Image (cartoon, rainbow, N blue to C red):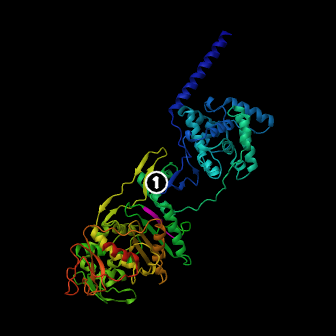
Amino acid sequence: MKTTASLMFSSIILCVAVIFILLLYMRSQALPVSKMGPATEMYDIHGEVIETLNDGKNMQPVPLADISPDLIHATLAIEDRNFYHHYGFDLRGIARAAVVNLQHMAKVQGAGTITQQLARNLYLSHERTWSRKVKETYYAVQMELHMTKDQILEEYLNQIYYGHSTYGIEAASKLFFGKDAKDLTLAESAMLAGIPKGPRYYSPYYDLKSSKDRQETVLQTMVATGDITQQQADQAAKEPLNILPLEPKKPAIAGYFRDYVRSTATELLGIDEDQFDDSGLKIYTTLDAAAQKIAEETVSSQLSGYNDLQAALVAVDPRSGYVKAMVGGRNYNENQFNRALSNTRQPGSSFKPIMYVTALQQKQYTPLTQFKSEPTTFTYDSGRKTYTPSNFDNKYYDWIDLRQAIAKSDNIFAVHTILDVGPDNVIAMARKMGINSPMQPLPSLALGTFPVSPYEMASAFGIFANQGLRVEPTVIVRIEDSRGKILYEANPAKEQVIEPPYTYVMTQLMESVFENGGTGSRVSSVLKRPVAGKTGTTDTDAWLVGYTPELSTAVWVGYDKGRQINAVESHLAAPIFAEFTEKALESVPPKLFPIPDGVANVYIDPATGKLANSDCPNSRMEAFVEGTQPTAYCTEQKQDSAKPAKPKGNGTWWEDLKRWWND
């Protein structure tokens, strides 16, 4: 007897020692890497979610303190009433379930704890095998050693599946009731707590009666656990539930932009794309969802009826460098190639302003600089080579000034300019303005024969809008991890690449593109605000790159395989630009481009290029970099320069407003 007792005592001591050592080992080992990481989310500039990057899973983690106590009690009552009194598995629960199942000769009741369910969801598959069950129990105990009960419960409530691609109580609460989890009533809590048992059976969207029956079961269980009274249960069961209609999935917007953000973020963080989706990151982007929707709808409507014709649009806020909208093609679902980033298309004449601003700075060109528009053969490379450009439809204009050359997109004037300035200097200016596409110092550079991307063009023209200050284009404002720690925060580089007076003069010149006789005049009736820009057309490409003080936008239209565009298709870039600009800035009052120091606005006589007086009635107001304006009058009769002859209106309200403003 004594020997038996001693043996039993030794066995108990040995078992306790083994268990103690096992627990120490389990505590020393890190938990496995979760197979179900929190979803990475992407937000627009206003903090609205534009994508959840986790196989379409809707998941919005919240702390336990932000979950209704009724929901917590309901979940514990129906799923694991002994949660706070076991160590990962519940022996009493196993015994109780075994008795019930034997009585019914079927598996009526499960014995898995909340910790075991969480372990299964995080680390294991849902296969019905003994080995999986053993692993599940092992990981459950390990979790209990590593985490507090509240941490386990919080994790569980943020991971559990409620059907309809919805994970976690916050997302479920918003899906079913349109409210935060902290605001759930007892009735709503009981309804939601019953769903995870079988979302296909207990979701009110599938079977409202079964869902209500399950709700009552949860309420009665809460009565049994003492969480509520029978009266509270009866009242909750009778309470009408305002279950929101199940909305169809909204078509994803900004597909091309989202792809670019993904590639940019993975490069910034140095992670793989599969890690990116399941890292629980929060990516705060520069996208304006409203502007993006307008951009997509505008491209779609303007290209309607033109099979296979493609388009790209990039809109940048020149003040911040933030990319507000990006369209890389007419239909992202059909083709994911992002033409907005592709530097394979020739910009044509839309490249000329970069050359002309170089001439303003280096050669002191002015709006009155003249060349003769006529068929011309140019020599270059010390006379060893020749180049013979031509104008569109072989139209020539005799002697024209810089304003007319820009408005009419004269190629002869452009080649005169680049040979005068030097192609290398133009390339240097393009590089300073953020254009990194390959270029060669040839006369044809003046006509935009070297491909660039719409992204580069939108950013470069933003410099004109921002008084010569280049702000590095940006698509990501910041990146946070799942705990809110900032992993990356944008700090766009800023550089004054052009002096403000030169960009202002270029802006005034490019406004003429949308006036009578300009290549963009066909959309002047659409534009209700001061806008500057430049068209560009090649055999295969149509462009319009333009800007207001708040938005710089590049639009390209063409075919993917080098197919030529016809005369009608070549005019589509302008209406896309005009419609997008007006709709995107609908809530923004029209604004004149600010006049910087160092600018002289004077009235000149176009016929003579001299200052206007009363003998020169067809005068126009022109902006000059201070010191380059004419000083002689059009006739010998001088006039007080403070009171120049008033020109006639040209039919555009903002030109008349500018005259009034400067007077």
Which quadrant of the structure image shows residue 123?
top right
In the image, is residue 426 above or below residue 54?
below
Q: Left or right: where does residue 307 sit relative to residue 595? A: right
Residue 388 falls inside the magenta stretch = no
The kind of secondary structure element at disc 1 is: strand
Name the foreground residue: 33 vs 471: 471
Q: Is residue 6 visible?
A: yes
Name the spot of residue 414 as percent of width and height, x first. 31, 81
The amino acid beneath tag 1 is Tyr
Q: Which residues are magenta?
A: 323-330
The C terminus sits in image quarter:
bottom left
Name the spot of residue 30 as percent of width and height, x first. 51, 36
Residue shown at the point (45%, 73%) measured from the top left? 577
Residue pointed to by mark 1: 284
In the image, is residue 484 above or below residue 620?
above
Name the spot of residue 211 as percent of width and height, x first. 73, 47
Give the mark count.
1
Q: Left or right: where does residue 597 sit relative to residue 195? A: left
Q: Residue furthest top?
A: 2
Residue shown at the point (27%, 73%) measured from the top left? 358
Q: Residue furthest right?
A: 104
Q: Is residue 327 visible?
A: no
Which quadrant of the structure image shows residue 543?
bottom left
Within 10 angstroms of label 1, few (less than 14), some, or many (20 or more) residues?
many
In the image, is residue 118 above or below residue 649?
above
In the image, is residue 225 above or below residue 654?
above
Which quadrant of the structure image shows residue 14?
top right
Name the foreground residue: 251 vs 92: 251
Q: What secondary structure prevails in the magenta region?
A: strand
Name the spot of residue 278 as percent of width and height, x first. 52, 49
The N terminus sits in image quarter:
top right
Name the foreground residue: 293 vs 278: 293
